[in-house]
Amino acid sequence: MEQKWKKSSPELGKVLDAALIRFTCDKKPMFGSPVFWINRNMFAGVHEDNLFIRLSENDRQEIVKKYPAARPFEPIKGRIMKEYIVLPESIYTDKGLFEEWLKRAHAYAASLPPKVKKGAK
């Protein structure tokens, strides 16, 4: 059965665009939504009404402990993207707090080996 996604929130897209203006990254759509990449590694994006980031294991444990509304990113029911966390509104509406978590996500993705572009088959 094909997954039908709800159109992503334009407001959340604008929030993420504004927050990442000073970051070195690429913006490319995924899920029909704005997603940000460094070295071809995804680290932040919007999916439907969710704003998600990619974090290290330690940072994921910390954010879930401090902010119980933070949860694993599950774009398809039953398929959790293991390094990604959906941010609660209390984080992305606090400019300083949001920037702190975006810096962590950006640094984590930048620390990963660059993904090699797949060639045509």
Image (spheres, rainbow, N blue to C red):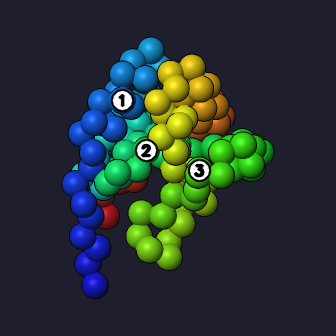
Disc 1 residue crowd, few under 14, some 14–19, many 20+, Cα 10 Å: some
For residue 1, side relative to residue 25 (left or right): left
Residue 70, numbered circle? 3
Q: CA distance from mark 1 to mark 2?
A: 9 Å
What amino acid is found at the position of numbered circle 1 in the picture? Answer: Val
At 26% from the left edge and 64% from the top edge, which residue is drawn?
5
Q: Are marks 1 and 2 in contact (CB under 8 Å)?
A: yes
At 43% from the left edge and 44% from the top edge, which residue is drawn?
51
What amino acid is found at the position of numbered circle 3 in the picture? Answer: Ala
Indicate the secondary structure of the residue bearing disc 2: strand
Q: Position of residue 28 (x, y in %)?
A: 31, 39
The residue carrying mark 1 is: 15
Q: Which callout, 1 or 2, points at the residue further toward the start of the chain?
A: 1
Q: Position of residue 100 (x, y in %)?
A: 61, 25
The residue carrying mark 2 is: 51
Q: Is residue 56 visible?
A: no
For residue 65, side relative to residue 83 (left or right): right
Q: Does residue 13 sit above or below 50 in this rendering?
A: above
Q: Which of the two residues, 111 or 82, is positioned nearer the viewer here?
A: 82
Q: Position of residue 52 (x, y in %)?
A: 48, 46
